[in-house]
Image: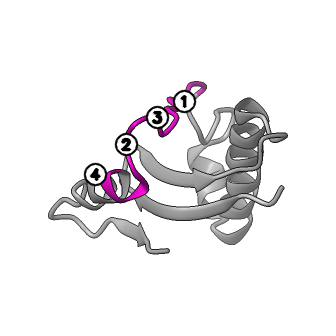
């Protein structure tokens, strides 16, 4: 889909991503792909999760998207960087 992940932060209950996407890619289709493929890979790599999520979805139904608008990439990257907590959250640097 030619989508670039510029910055990201994965917490226990949510994810922040700064993405660069081409204009022909719809947000809803992108989120569907991200959730679907990541669920498939997580359940394939960690079979014990199949018991936890049996009959349930790995991801919640909803999502929040905001376009960049007047904020620069650097401002958004700083916001994502400030989402760090004391736990061992996963960071994506780009």
Q: Which is more foreground, mark 4 or mark 2?
A: 2
Above or below for 8 versus 65: below
Q: How far apart are marks 4 and 2 (CA)?
A: 11 Å
> Is residue 71 part of the magenta span, yes or no?
yes
Local crowd size for mark 3, using a 10 Å CA cut-off: few (<14), some (14–19), many (≥20): few
For the residues bearing labels 1 and 3, Cβ distance under 8 angstroms: no
**59 sits left or right of 30 in the view:** left
Residue that carries the numbered disc 1 in the rendered image: 63
For the residues bearing labels 3 and 2, Cβ distance under 8 angstroms: yes
Residue that carries the numbered disc 3 in the rendered image: 69
Q: Give the quarter of the image for residue 73.
A: bottom left
Residue that carries the numbered disc 4 in the rendered image: 79
Above or below for 28 versus 80: above
Q: Distance between the residues labelled 2 and 1?
A: 20 Å
Q: Which is more foreground, mark 4 or mark 3?
A: 3
Residue that carries the numbered disc 2 in the rendered image: 71
Q: Which residues, given as a range, are shown in magenta?
A: 61-75
């Amino acid at each position: 889909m030619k989508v670039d992940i510029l910055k990201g932060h994965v917490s226990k209950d949510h994810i922040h991503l700064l993405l660069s996407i081409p204009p022909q890619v719809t947000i809803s289709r992108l989120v569907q792909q991200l959730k679907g493929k990541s669920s498939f890979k997580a359940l394939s790599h960690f079979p014990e999760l199949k018991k936890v999520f049996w009959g349930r979805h790995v991801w919640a139904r909803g999502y929040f998207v905001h376009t960049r608008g007047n904020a620069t990439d650097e401002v958004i990257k700083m916001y994502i960087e400030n989402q760090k907590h004391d736990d061992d959250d996963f960071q994506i640097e780009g």
